Image (tube, rainbow, N blue to C red):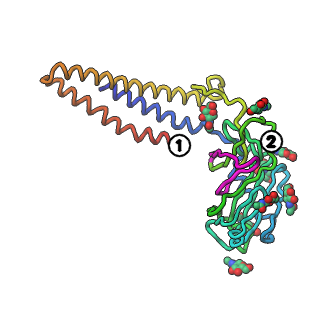
């Protein structure tokens, strides 16, 4: 019984130690996609005070953004719904509804060019096209681009994204895939619909990827070779120990059960055995319900 309790406590301490360690393992490189998107929106808004509705406006970006392109368009919502829009890399078919819906909307288009891989990364894949993005905002009378971010609901065909310049050098025989970036570095990989086209049903940032040439074989202890990855290594150790603890618990429980079975066969009248048996069977079940919520919480960062 004491051994079992000790195992549980040990496990809890190890898991709580690993929690803060894991969160420091993620580092940021200073290229934040969200702040870039907000910067481009504000820059576009400031560049033209009363732009013509329905025409694409190129934005001339500051010199230190050289290589990046941005443009925006204001469209009447009714016209957008009935005719769609075909600007920059995006073909938006009719019957796409902006939410919330105003009289007019503004769409800002981005092409990150040679900055793409600084802002967007896909582990195990290599970008072979620039990251392009489109974001929609309200467009009230007083200003070109409002503060309200819109979402799209597509009732009809999906939105098509064109990638006219895909890097061919990254291997002729590899299958290219579409990638859509989400919040916080997340991404989703889908198949291309043609040589140079991807589809989507929502706003966001997109590119084309191929599998990275030499995907390293999975290492049981990442950072064994590189000293820089000491944190990862410690996490590996911690989880390894935790796993060992679990195995010990399982072995202990199995042994106990086997012992109990043989004792049960020997004698049913033994009073000492009875109390012993009740005491042991209560412990594991109570401990299990106490530990489970902790383990589940650990899985969601
Ligand atoms: C906007 O910029 C793109 C790319 O630099 C160019 O192809 C296009 O002609 C420009 N459009 C206008 C209206 O200046
Ligand atoms: C360019 O300079 C502005 C300040 O003038 C700065 O806010 C911005 O982050 C710089 N852009 C890049 C990509 O470093
Ligand atoms: C992208 O290319 C432009 C020249 O076309 C250069 O000025 C800029 O420094 C490059 N940016 C990066 C991040 O390599
Ligand atoms: C959208 O515009 C591009 C050129 O900018 C053109 O090649 C393409 O056919 C157009 N798509 C539709 C559906 O009109
Ligand atoms: C915006 O202007 C249009 C006419 O240009 C007018 O019909 C509409 O009521 C105005 N909307 C607001 C919120 O002022
Ligand atoms: C756009 O610019 C106007 C002034 O021209 C300003 O009042 C408004 O707050 C700006 N919008 C955003 C989203 O920054
Ligand atoms: C590409 O694949 C074809 C057969 O699928 C093969 O004949 C060709 O040599 C491959 N090319 C390269 C560069 O690997
Ligand atoms: C990348 O590949 C490694 C090993 O091939 C794998 O362990 C890892 O989960 C992969 N990462 C992603 C995000 O798929």
Q: Secondary structure at mark 1?
A: loop
Residue placed most toward the observer, 81 or 76 = 81
Q: Residue at x 31, y 25 (%)?
A: 2
Q: Quadrant of residue 81?
A: bottom right
Residue placed most toward the observer, 244 or 200 = 200
Q: Residue at x 70, y 53 (%)?
A: 35
Q: Position of residue 34 (x, y in %)?
A: 68, 52
On residue 301, which mark appears?
A: 1
Is the distance from the Cβ of mark 1 to the nearest ligand 8 atom less than 8 Å?
no
Q: Quadrant of residue 9?
A: top left
Whether residue 202 appears in magenta in the rendering, the answer is yes
Q: Position of residue 19 (x, y in %)?
A: 51, 37
Q: Quadrant of residue 91?
A: bottom right
State how far apart marks 1 and 2 are (Cα). 36 Å
Please indicate whether residue 195 sits to the left or right of residue 283 in the image. right
Residue bearing mark 2: 167
Q: Earlier in the sequence, mark 1 or mark 2?
A: 2
Residues in magenta? 184-205
Badge nearest the viewer, 1 or 2:
2
């Amino acid at each position: 019984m004491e051994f079992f309790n000790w195992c549980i406590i040990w496990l809890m301490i190890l898991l709580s130690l690993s929690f803060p360690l894991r969160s420091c393992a993620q580092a940021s490189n200073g290229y934040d996609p969200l702040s870039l998107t907000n910067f481009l929106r504000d820059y576009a808004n400031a560049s033209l005070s009363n732009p013509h509705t329905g025409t694409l406006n190129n934005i001339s970006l500051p010199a230190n953004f050289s290589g990046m392109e941005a443009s925006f368009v204001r469209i009447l919502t009714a016209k957008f719904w009935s005719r769609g829009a075909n600007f920059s890399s995006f073909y938006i078919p009719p019957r796409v509804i902006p939410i919330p819906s105003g009289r007019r909307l503004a769409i800002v288009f981005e092409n990150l060019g040679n900055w793409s891989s600084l802002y967007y990364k896909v582990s195990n894949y290599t970008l072979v096209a620039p990251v392009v993005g489109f974001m929609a905002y309200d467009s009230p009378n007083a200003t070109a681009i409002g503060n309200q971010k819109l979402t799209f609901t597509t009732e009809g065909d999906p939105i098509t994204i064109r990638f006219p310049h895909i890097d061919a050098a990254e291997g002729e025989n590899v299958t290219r895939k579409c990638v859509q970036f989400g919040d916080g570095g997340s991404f989703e990989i889908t198949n291309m619909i043609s040589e140079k086209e991807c589809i989507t049903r929502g706003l966001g940032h997109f590119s084309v990827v191929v599998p990275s040439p030499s995907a390293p074989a999975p290492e049981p202890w990442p950072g064994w070779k590189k000293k820089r990855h000491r944190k990862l290594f410690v996490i590996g150790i911690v989880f390894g120990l935790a796993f060992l603890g679990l195995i010990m618990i399982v072995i202990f429980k199995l042994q106990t059960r086997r012992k109990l079975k043989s004792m049960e066969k020997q004698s049913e009248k033994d009073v000492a055995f009875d109390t012993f048996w009740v005491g042991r069977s209560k412990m594991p079940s109570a401990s299990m319900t106490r530990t489970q919520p902790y383990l589940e919480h650990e899985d969601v960062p």
